Amino acid sequence: MSKLATLKFIQAKRPSQLAPVIVRRHKLSKKIWEQLQLVKATLEGNTYHTTRHRIVVDPSTGLSKSIEMPKRVKQWWWTADTGKVCLTIRYGTKQINLNKDKNNVSINSNNNWTWLNAQPKLPNSINSNKS
């Protein structure tokens, strides 16, 4: 009983839904994480894809079953004419302006994507943003 006395009890109600801003932040964070995995796989010479579940009806039996299918991850970067790699952050099909009227990040391709070392902090910084 003494251990229960050390706990602090409160009255709280769990929200039924997350705020729309939080949902969008989680989605963007997940997509950035997928891009990091895609870059790492590309540098290693591998392919990367995520999976999704689909319900398929068997035409002969009429039963439906859930199967895993690969989902293609589109890369957000490309190589410009100057040899630099340009990176665009996207939310859905829209490009996000990272700076005033600028939506791309220029990366020197000769530094072997050293920006990847700092990128794992990016999804956390998106989730902790207050705006």
Image (spheres, rainbow, N blue to C red):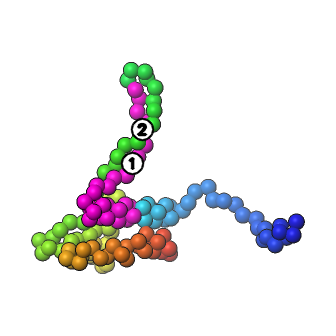
Amino acid type, residue under disc 1 in the picture: Thr
Disc 1 and disc 2 in contact, CB within 8 angstroms: no
Q: Quadrant of residue 74?
A: bottom left
Query: Which residue is label 2 attached to?
Result: 67
In magenta, the rendered stretch is 31-58
| Among the two numbered marks 1 and 2 on one chain, the one whose residue lies closer to the N terminus | 1
**Observer-nearest residue: 117 or 9?**
117
- Above or below, 34 relative to 86: above
Q: Which mark is residue 51?
A: 1
Q: Which residue is drawn at 39% across and 64% down?
A: 33
Q: Where is residue 29 in the image (x, y as percent from the top left)?
A: 43, 65
Circle 1 Cα neighbour tier, 10 Å, few/some/many (<14 / 14–19 / ≥20): few
Q: Which of 42 and 61 is in front in this view?
A: 42
- Residue 14 higher or lower than 55, as above or below: below
Q: What residue type is labelled 2?
A: Ile
Q: Position of residue 86 (x, y in %)?
A: 22, 71
Image point 30% across, 61% down: which residue?
41
Residue 17 visible somewhere in the drawing: yes
What is the C-alpha distance between the residues marked 1 and 2? 10 Å
**To which quarter of the image does residue 34 belong?**
bottom left
Report x, y in % for residue 117.
Answer: 36, 75
* Residue beneath the point at 33% across and 73% down: 116
Q: Is residue 80 magenta?
A: no
